[in-house]
């Protein structure tokens, strides 16, 4: 293929030499943005495509692409759901993502662990003044009474097994 002095290939040497050259006249010329490698054509485009309008806006339905684009690997096929996936979908079970270990502490304005070293559950342990919760206090008293009663029951059972200083064990 020969190249003319202006840098364009000559029509005589091309394989489509029997056709006439095509010139396109548009009312508004292209605008170029070389920084983005963009050529913008403000003229109406694709007038043969279907135009749909709904609450989201105006949509232009484009035809299927005709030029295949290169791809290193084939598009992966959709995996068939496992028995568990089918069961979970049937029962409406959703995957629970475990909570993170961190929680936001509004007093310090920082993220701290929920438990463990310097955890949020340790808040109030070192306070010099603590308000007593009567419900918790009653609960702890009840637990102490239960423990005391169990100790006395064990002591009584040990005493009842002893006969004349001899221990009868089973």
Image (cartoon, helix red, strand yellow):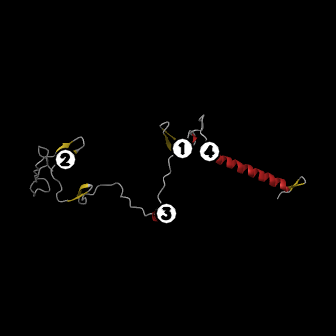
Residue ID for mark 1? 114
Is there a contact, CB below 8 Å, between mark 1 and mark 3? no
The residue tagged 2 is: 40
Q: Nearer the viewer, mark 2 or mark 3?
A: 3
From the viewer's perspective, is the residue at label 4 or at label 1 nearer?
4
Taking the image as drawn, is residue 61 in sight?
Answer: no
Neighbor class of circle 3 (other Cα within 10 Å; few <14, some 14-19, many 20+) is few
**Which circle marks residue 133 in the picture?**
none
Placement of the C terminus among the 4 image quadrants: bottom right
Q: Calculate the distance from the C-alpha at mark 4 to the C-alpha at mark 3.
A: 48 Å
What residue is pinned by disc 4?
134
Q: Is residue 2 above or below residue 84?
A: above
Instruction: Give the crowd class for mark 1: few <14, some 14-19, many >=20 residues within 10 Å.
Output: some
List x then y, in percent, for residue 166: 89, 54
Q: Secondary structure at mark 4?
A: helix
Horizontal side of 61 relative to 110 (left or right) equals left
Specify whether 71 is left or right of 165: left
Query: Is mark 4 in CB contact (under 8 Å) with mark 3?
Result: no
Q: Is residue 26 above or below residue 93?
A: above
Mark 2 or mark 1: name the one nearer the start of the chain.
2
Q: Which mark is residue 84?
A: 3
Q: Nearer the viewer, mark 2 or mark 4?
A: 4
Helix, strand or loop at label 3? It is: helix
Give the CA distance from mark 1 to mark 3.
32 Å
Decide which of 1, 78 is in the foreground and name it: 78
- Give the Cα distance between marks 4 and 1: 26 Å
């Amino acid at each position: 293929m020969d190249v003319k002095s202006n840098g364009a290939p000559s029509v005589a040497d091309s394989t489509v030499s029997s056709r006439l050259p095509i010139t396109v006249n548009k009312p508004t010329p292209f605008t170029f943005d070389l920084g983005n490698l963009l050529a913008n054509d403000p003229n109406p485009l694709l007038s043969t495509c279907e135009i749909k309008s709904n609450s989201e806006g105006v949509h232009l339905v484009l035809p299927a692409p005709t030029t295949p684009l290169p791809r290193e690997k084939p598009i992966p096929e959709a995996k068939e759901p496992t028995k568990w996936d089918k069961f979970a979908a049937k029962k409406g079970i959703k995957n629970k993502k475990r909570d993170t270990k961190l929680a936001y502490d509004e007093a310090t304005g920082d993220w701290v662990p929920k438990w463990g070293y310097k955890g949020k559950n340790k808040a109030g342990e070192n306070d010099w003044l603590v308000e007593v919760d009567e419900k918790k206090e009653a609960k702890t008293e009840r637990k102490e009474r239960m423990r005391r009663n169990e100790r006395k029951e064990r002591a009584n059972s040990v005493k009842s097994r002893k006969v004349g200083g001899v221990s009868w064990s089973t």
